[in-house]
């Protein structure tokens, strides 16, 4: 059994917890981005959607959905690769500093350990031991001095794919009514309902994965999406009114 599998099973980590950041990031952005297109059209004129036509809403919405999903997925992939490269470069430099100036690095680690709550005696003893184990010491310094986690267990490609799929799955919600009905004011209201349902589902997923307070996770998720939608609708009113 590899370490990632052991960690997931030992700590009962589900896939939703492992990729929670990518799911929430991609899902929320997908919902907001797509609904911004729909609400922007709705706000352009009182009867703007009827004049523009449902096909145009779908064309703009789908084009935006897929283009942004690809952009988000690739952005997550490139960000993960950049973090991995930066981590390894910084760690190699830390190993070189430990080899060239072990006394200074030992003193730095001792200070860090004391700041983390160890007594002066324990911090000194631990630092004395760690200086003879440069690899472990470098890992500690990367975590406590630079706040960088080891990216070896992360897969930039998988993270990018999860972000892409989450963006598509949640971002399609505002467009569903336009696939089923003619573009009227009622269709826009239905789009609002499906958007709120998607935001609620995303909030529930976040709540289930984190165990945080239900009202907080739902409130934050829905509030952020609603605020962005209101901005898009307002801009449509100003431009088209």
Image (cartoon, grey):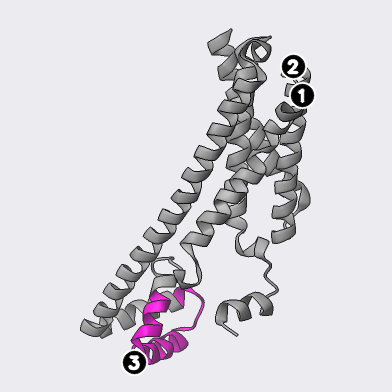
Residue located 50% across and 38% down the image = 67
Query: What's the mark number on residue 184?
Result: 2
Lower sequence index among marks 1 and 3? 3
Circles 1 and 2: CB atoms closer than 8 Å: yes
Instruction: Measure the C-alpha gap from mark 3 to mark 2.
Output: 72 Å
Q: Position of residue 174 (x, y in %)?
A: 68, 33
How many numbered dots are placed on residues in this image?
Answer: 3
Q: Position of residue 187 (x, y in %)?
A: 75, 22
Q: Residues within 10 Å of mark 2 (few under 14, many from 20)?
A: some
* Residue assigned mark 3: 132
Q: Is residue 149 left or right of residue 16?
A: left
Q: Is residue 162 left or right of residue 106?
A: right
Please name whichever residue, 48 or 142, is drawn nearer the observer in this view of the structure: 48
Residue located 74% across and 16% down the image = 184
What is the magenta segment's predominant secondary structure? helix
Q: Nearer the viewer, mark 1 or mark 2?
A: 1
Query: What's the mark number on residue 231?
Result: none
Point out the stretch of residues depicted in magenta: 114-141
Q: Is residue 3 left or right of residue 74?
A: right
Lower sequence index among marks 3 and 2? 3
The question of residue 66 being in magenta is answered with: no
Q: Secondary structure at mark 1?
A: loop
Instruction: Measure the C-alpha gap from mark 1 to mark 2.
Output: 8 Å
* Residue assigned mark 1: 181
| Quadrant location of the N terminus in the rendered image | bottom right
Instruction: Measure the C-alpha gap from mark 1 to mark 3.
Output: 70 Å
**Residue 163, relative to residue 121: is it above or below?**
above
In this view of the protein, can residue 11 be seen by the observer? yes
Q: Position of residue 14 (x, y in %)?
A: 69, 67
């Amino acid at each position: 059994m590899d370490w990632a599998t052991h960690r997931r099973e030992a700590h009962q980590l589900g896939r939703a917890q492992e990729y929670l950041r990518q799911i929430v990031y991609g899902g929320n952005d997908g919902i907001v981005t797509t609904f911004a297109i729909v609400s922007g059209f709705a706000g352009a004129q009182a009867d703007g959607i009827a004049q523009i036509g449902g096909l145009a809403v779908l064309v703009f919405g789908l084009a935006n959905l897929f283009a942004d999903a690809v952009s988000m997925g690739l952005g997550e992939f490139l960000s993960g690769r950049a973090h991995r490269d930066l981590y390894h470069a910084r760690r190699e430099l830390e190993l070189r500093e430990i080899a060239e100036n072990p006394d200074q690095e030992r003193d730095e680690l001792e200070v860090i350990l004391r700041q983390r709550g160890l007594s002066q005696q324990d911090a000194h003893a631990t630092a004395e031991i760690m200086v003879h184990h440069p690899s472990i010491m470098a890992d500690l310094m990367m975590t406590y001095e630079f706040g960088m986690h080891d990216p070896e267990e992360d897969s930039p490609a998988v993270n990018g794919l999860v972000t892409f799929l989450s963006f598509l799955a949640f971002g399609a919600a505002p467009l569903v009514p336009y696939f089923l009905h003619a573009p009227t004011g009622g269709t826009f209201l239905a789009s609002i309902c499906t958007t709120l349902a998607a935001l609620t589902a995303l909030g529930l997923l976040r709540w289930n994965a984190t165990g945080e307070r239900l009202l907080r996770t739902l409130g934050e998720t829905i509030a952020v999406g609603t605020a962005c939608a209101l901005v898009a609708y307002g801009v449509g009113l100003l431009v088209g009114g």
